[in-house]
Image (spheres, rainbow, N blue to C red):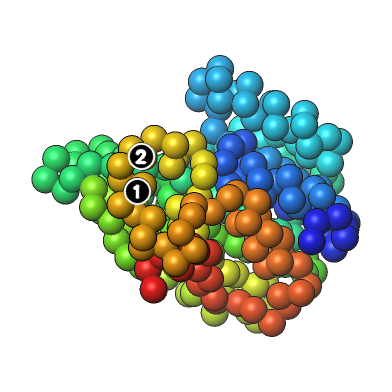
Amino acid sequence: MPGLLQLAGRLAIVTGGASGIGKAICTRLVQDGAKVAVADIVSTDAQRERLAAVVADLGASAHAFPVDVSKHDQVKTMMEDISVVFNEDPNICVNCAGITRDVFLNKMTLAAWDDVIDVNLKGTFLVTQAVAQRMEEGKVQNASIINVASIIAKTGNMSQASYAASKAGVVGFTKSVAKELGRSHIRVNAILPGFIVTPMTDIVPDKLLQKLMPQIALRRLGQPHEVADLVAFLASDQSSYITGAAIEISGGLGM
């Protein structure tokens, strides 16, 4: 339940925080008392304005950090800027930045494949590594890293070979990193959202959604705030003995 300030005094970084699930996560973390570094790409004026608007809505607890998570130098700069602005390092990290380039295998270009892997998997690696290094060096308390994967990592999906591969990689990456960082009391978990109402699902044709609905036990799409609730739980002390988990939040899709 939001508003309990269970994350008071903590600093979170959320990549992909300017829209969709990432935006909902930022909102929920602020409601729970956290300060939030809202990170997102700003390669266009529209993206820059979107990021600024989200931070303005969140208030003084949030600051904007432009970043392309697939670029090592930009991730490094972002982490340095966060330390300057907040005068501390994050003890919560949510890797939510992600893209799709949906196309059937035989028509997929190498560039399209690389784009998805670079953002979804390489980006998760770069940000997690940068955050974990600071968490370990600073002996950050109550540290939690949450990687947003997808139910598609489990089920696969036509025209989404690159997306499925990237998100399955995130799950495997999460479990491996959880084993490494457990000795430093840093918890690392993944969540696997199903079809959530976001700009990404807005482009899915209605006829495809109607075919999909019978496969979802709850017979509806999820809402971003429902995913944010799960993230808030994993970021808090309420999940203090959970690490290396891959938790589905899909309404029963893929059972």
What residue do we see at 50% from left, 25% from top?
A: 43
Position of 71 relative to 132 (above/below): above
Q: Residues within 10 Å of mark 2 (few under 14, many from 20)?
A: few
Q: Residues within 10 Å of mark 1 (few under 14, many from 20)?
A: few
Q: Secondary structure at mark 2?
A: helix
Tell me, for residue 206, which label it has, or none.
2
- Residue farthest to the left, as pictured: 106
What residue do we see at 36% from left, 63% from top?
A: 215
Tell me, for residue 68, which label it has, or none.
none
The residue beneath circle 1 is 210
x and y, in percent, of residue 174 in the image:
50, 68
Give the quarter of the image for residue 129: bottom right
x and y, in percent, of residue 139 in the image:
77, 68
x and y, in percent, of residue 107 in the image:
14, 40
Indicate the quadrant containing the C terminus: top left, top right, bottom left or bottom right: bottom left
Q: Amino acid at mark 1?
A: Gln
Viewer-side residue, 102 vs 83: 102
Can residue 223 be seen in this snapshot?
yes
Q: CA distance from mark 1 to mark 2?
A: 6 Å
Viewer-side residue, 222 vs 120: 222
- Residue farthest to the top, as pictured: 45
What residue do we see at 67% from left, 72% from top?
A: 186
